[in-house]
Image: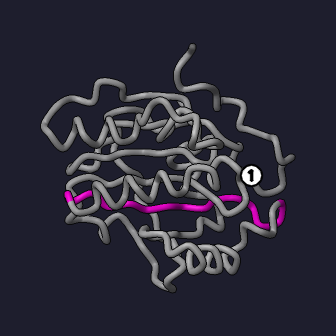
Amino acid sequence: MAFTLQIGEKAPDFNLLATDGKHYSLQDFADAKALVVFFTCNHCPFVKGSDEVTRETVLKYGPQGVKFLAISSNSATAYPEDSYEKMIERIEEHKFPWVYAYDEKQEAALAYGALRTPHFYVFDADRKLIYTGRAVDSPKDASKITSYELNNALEEYLTGKEVSVPLTNPIGCNVKWEGKDKRWMPEEACDLVLN
């Protein structure tokens, strides 16, 4: 069985506390034309390098009915800077235009099969997965970006086309699993696309 959610599969539900003090589940995004769930964190250089690119995507597609949910699943034991308190500090400092939720028990990361930070999942109006992988090809250094896979997927979907590239490999730090070495990944987790 694949570790990461497969194209066409339904979005797993969740109940997560966000930095605004509210709990969120799939139902809270029921009116979205599309839902982008992305696994992220506070400390990762690939996240920091591409947060402003992600902001541009949210500002472009949010008005078109797309909702965005960022989830941090990293172990705060392994990385104290990824704690819930630090998440609140970071979103308040940067004023990110997305819901930022904490997956303290790492249940959402396992349900979705999150591999890296950042790792993006796009769900259609029926909450079926139509794209997963990276947002851009150079998240660590935005000046070297040559392709915008997340934007392409959203653009195609919103204009009634089939997503031409539904699967890419996420680029970033691996998710930091509780009680495991910082570089550990589940045995069944591997590249989504063989290059």
Name above or below for residue 116 compared with residue 34. above
Q: Residue furthest front?
A: 143
Q: Amino acid at mark 1?
A: Lys
Magenta region, residue range: 64-78
Question: Residue at left 38%, top 52%?
Answer: 57
Residue with the mark numbered 1: 176
Q: Residue furthest top?
A: 195
Observer-nearest residue: 51 or 131? 51
Observer-nearest residue: 125 or 179? 125
Say left or right for 149 vs 156.
Answer: right
Residue 69 part of the magenta segment: yes
Question: Residue at left 69%, top 80%?
Answer: 85
The quadrant in which residue 159 appears is top left
The quadrant in which residue 68 appears is bottom left
Give neighbour class at mark 1: few <14, some 14-19, many 20+ (Cα, 10 Å): many
The figure's colour scheme reads: one colour
Observer-nearest residue: 45 or 81? 45
Question: Residue at left 73%, top 38%?
Answer: 185
Q: Secondary structure at mark 1?
A: loop
Image coords of residue 164 (percent x, y): 29, 24
Residue 119 part of the magenta segment: no
Image coords of residue 136 (percent x, y): 49, 37
Label count reads 1
Name above or below for residue 147 compared with residue 140. above
Image coords of residue 118 (percent x, y): 58, 48
Observer-nearest residue: 184 or 135? 135
Image coords of residue 140 (percent x, y): 65, 43
